[in-house]
């Protein structure tokens, strides 16, 4: 499937259906003393929350189900599923009566923390009376997220027999078919929804738009838009970004620009997709080589968010780098550097890469020297860029040293050290041109740490040795 289109996460679709969040101000007022204490707790063990609750009860305090559910929602919203899991463990151990919606949430938490088998075991262990629309919806959502097609379909058919299948469950299956590259099944299932008068929501329509784009049926894309209008389904930021991406991929730049400009007019501080929408607009405008659109989107964003964060500045720098606008790129970088509260090396990396790809060696060296003087610690990607810089300056030993430092840092952080194809080719060309066998062996020793590069490295060493033998003879 074509990349770049926006696909709603089926897990988030299910979460929206399962619970209704209170307004932040209302939620804050209702937070209990227990809630505040646990949120402030810094877990020192896997069962820290369980131990705290045990001590709380032993001290004569009461724990209400509503307090625990509020805490679970708090941790879920912050992707701290292991902490939410501790709360469910305590509820089960303490025999706190759980509602059906709580059981459904528990299934999702178990899937995220202990795997699909654990979620299945929990669902299978429920009494028949607890196997309702919500718990069935939770387990099918797990199957769809895990891409277990046979069990998802079997569960879905059972839900249809029980008259449990509603829009959110159809959306989970639609998302599964889309992710499994089965667009025809997406279309067929939407047709089934329409035949059964099951409402299509904004997520259904977005999946359908993406599907017709994959099928390259752009007349159908327009028909979906008309259906949305006819059914009074609002074309939100999410959908506009989706459509703009589809149009750009198709080369329909006029329509794409119209959608992007519509997004700018729709933006407001409470819009959940504000930051994502900025990224979409900047990327698509840069894809269309539309510098004025990039600048307008940035100014529009800044008028809403007066202090854009590091990631927002990063989106802007990437777009400007792609368009080759050095002056604005440097201005935005200085603007960020002057006002940032925390230094993020992803941003100077964009500028370093811009300079290096244009052989602006002096500018790249000056930038890095300035960063070192400020005491900034490079991230892993920086070491690859520094290796590029040193090779271009003819400092091969320094380049090899940066490479080794990158591998060492990656090992300490338990992360992979990604070296760009550009960097690898710079090393290969440099070493081959100079027939430098000793340094080639050092480079190859480093490269053997990356799977899939053995043949390239062996070929390089063989060429260098052959060249050296020819020179000697």
Image (spheres, rainbow, N blue to C red):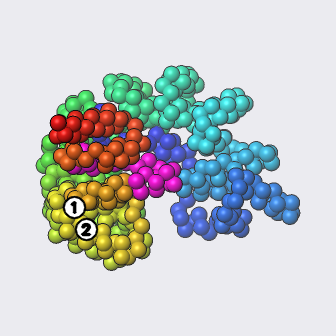
Instruction: Give the x, y percent position of residue 355.
Output: 20, 62
Which of 379 and 295 lies nearest the eye of the viewer?
Answer: 379
Give the crowd class for mark 1: few <14, some 14-19, many >=20 residues within 10 Å: some
Image quarter of residue 191:
top left
Give the crowd class for mark 2: few <14, some 14-19, many >=20 residues within 10 Å: some
Residue 154, can we see it? yes
At x 19%, y 68%, the residue is 362
Marks 2 and 1 close (CB-CB < 8 Å):
yes
Residues under labels 2 and 1: Cα distance? Answer: 9 Å
Q: Is residue 417 magenta?
A: yes
Instruction: Give the x, y percent position of residue 228.
Output: 30, 41
Instruction: Give the x, y percent position of residue 174.
Output: 41, 32
Considering only vertical position in the picture, is 425 above or below 75? above
Toward the front, the furthest residue is 473
Q: First in sequence: mark 2 or mark 1?
A: 2
Residue 302, can we see it? no
Considering only vertical position in the picture, is 422 above or below 266? above
Which image quarter holds the N terminus?
Answer: top left
Q: Is the magenta stretch mostly helix, strand or loop?
A: helix
Image quarter of residue 198:
top left
Residue 333 got which mark? none
Residue tagged 2 = 365
On the picture, is 195 further left or further right than 129?
left
At x 30%, y 42%, the residue is 5
Which image quarter holds the C terminus?
Answer: top left
> How many numbered marks have been drawn onto this rendered protein structure?
2
Instruction: Give the x, y percent position of residue 356.
Output: 21, 59
Residue tagged 1 = 393
Specify the segment rendered in magenta. 404-430
Which of 422 and 9 lies nearest the eye of the viewer?
Answer: 422
């Amino acid at each position: 499937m074509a990349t770049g289109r926006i696909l709603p996460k089926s897990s988030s679709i299910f979460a929206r259906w399962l619970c209704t969040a209170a307004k932040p101000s209302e939620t804050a007022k209702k937070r209990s003393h227990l809630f505040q204490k646990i949120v402030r707790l810094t877990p020192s063990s896997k069962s820290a929350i369980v131990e705290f609750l045990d001590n709380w009860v032993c001290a004569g305090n009461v724990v209400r189900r509503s307090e625990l559910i509020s805490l679970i929602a708090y941790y879920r919203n912050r992707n701290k599923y292991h902490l939410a899991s501790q709360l469910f463990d305590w509820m089960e151990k303490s025999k706190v009566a759980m509602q059906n919606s709580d059981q459904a949430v528990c299934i999702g938490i178990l899937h995220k923390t202990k795997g699909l088998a654990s979620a299945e075991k929990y669902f299978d262990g429920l009494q028949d009376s607890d196997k309702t629309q919500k718990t069935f919806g939770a387990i099918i959502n797990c199957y769809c997220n895990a891409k277990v097609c046979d069990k998802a379909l079997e569960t879905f058919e059972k839900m249809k027999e029980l008259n449990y299948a509603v829009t959110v469950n159809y959306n989970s299956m639609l998302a599964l078919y889309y992710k499994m590259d089965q667009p025809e099944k997406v279309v067929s299932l939407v047709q089934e929804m329409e035949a059964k008068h099951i409402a299509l929501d904004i997520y259904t329509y977005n999946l359908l738009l993406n599907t017709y784009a994959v099928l390259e049926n752009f007349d159908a894309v327009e028909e979906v838009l008309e259906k949305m209008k006819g059914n009074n389904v609002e074309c939100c930021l999410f959908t506009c970004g989706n459509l703009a991406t589809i149009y750009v991929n198709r080369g329909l730049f006029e329509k794409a620009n119209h959608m992007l400009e519509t997004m700018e007019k729709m933006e407001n501080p409470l819009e959940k997709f504000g930051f994502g929408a900025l990224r979409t607009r900047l990327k698509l405008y840069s894809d269309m080589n539309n510098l004025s659109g990039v600048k307008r989107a940035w100014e529009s964003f800044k008028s809403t968010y007066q202090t854009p964060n590091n990631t927002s500045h990063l989106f802007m720098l990437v777009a400007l780098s792609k368009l080759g606008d050095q002056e604005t790129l440097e201005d935005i970088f200085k603007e960020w550097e002057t006002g940032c509260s925390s230094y993020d090396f992803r941003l100077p990396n964009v500028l370093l890469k811009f300079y290096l790809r244009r052989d602006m060696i002096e500018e790249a060296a000056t930038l890095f020297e300035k960063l070192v003087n400020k005491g900034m610690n490079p991230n892993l990607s920086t070491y690859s860029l520094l290796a590029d810089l040193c090779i271009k300056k003819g400092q091969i030993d320094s380049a090899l040293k940066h490479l080794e430092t990158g591998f060492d840092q990656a090992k300490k952080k338990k992360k992979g050290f990604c070296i760009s194809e550009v960097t690898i080719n710079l090393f290969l060309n440099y070493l081959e041109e100079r027939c430098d066998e000793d340094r080639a062996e050092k480079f190859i020793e480093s490269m053997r740490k990356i799977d899939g590069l053995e043949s390239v490295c062996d070929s390089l060493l063989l060429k260098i040795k052959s060249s050296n033998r020819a020179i000697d003879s």
